[in-house]
C-alpha cells in the first residue's frame, strides 16, 4: 500500500520551522492571511507533479493553531 505524502513535511522548498499551507494563483497570495507567509517557486500536486500557474505558500509552524496544523497534516 502506498503511503500518503504530506507536503507539510516533504515539499522540497519548505524551510526549517515552516509548514506548507496551500498552492495558489499569484494574484491570490494576498488573500492568504498568515503574517509569516512565504511564497515559493514551484507548486506540486499530491503525486509530486508540477502544477503550472500556481505557487506554493508556506508559513511558520508557530503561527498556525494546532487544530489547523492537524487538518493540514491529514491532507
Image (cartoon, grey):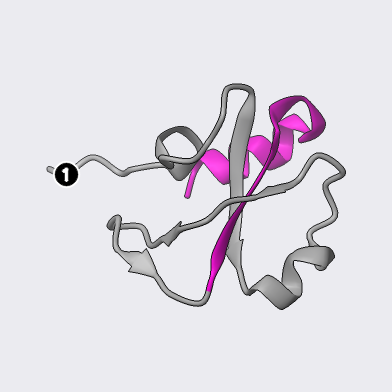
Q: Where is mark 1, residue-wise?
A: 2
Residue at 65 percent of width and 36 percent of height: 69
Q: Position of residue 56 (x, y in %)?
A: 56, 56
Q: In this view, does 65 lie to the left or right of 21?
A: right
Instruction: Reply yes or no: does residue 58 show up in magenta.
Output: yes
Position of residue 49 measured from the top left corner of the image (x, y, whole percent) = 29, 63
Q: Give the range drawn in magenta.
A: 54-75
Residue shown at the point (81%, 39%) measured from the top left: 36
In this picture, is 37 found above or below 22? above
Question: Residue 72 occupies which quadrant of the picture?
Answer: top right
Residue beneath the point at 81% across and 32% down = 63
Q: Quadrant of the N terminus?
A: top left
State the image quarter where residue 44 is shown.
Answer: bottom left
Q: Which residue is drawn at 30% across and 44% down?
A: 4
28 or 3, which is in the foreground? 28
41 magenta-colored: no
- x then y, percent, for residue 61: 70, 29
Between 67 and 12, the one nearer to me in the picture: 12
Crowdedness of circle 1 by 10 Å Cα count: few (<14), some, many (20+)? Answer: few
Taking 55 as reference, is 37 left or right? right
Residue 48 x, y percent position in the rendering: 30, 55
Amino acid at each position: 500500500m502506498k503511503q500518503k505524502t504530506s507536503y507539510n513535511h516533504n515539499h522540497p522548498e519548505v524551510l526549517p520551522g515552516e509548514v506548507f499551507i496551500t498552492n495558489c494563483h499569484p494574484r491570490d497570495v494576498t488573500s492568504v492571511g498568515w503574517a509569516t507567509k512565504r511564497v515559493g517557486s514551484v507548486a506540486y500536486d499530491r503525486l509530486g507533479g508540477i502544477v503550472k500557474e500556481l505557487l506554493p505558500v508556506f508559513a511558520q509552524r508557530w503561527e498556525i493553531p494546532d487544530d489547523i496544523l492537524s487538518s493540514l497534516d491529514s491532507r
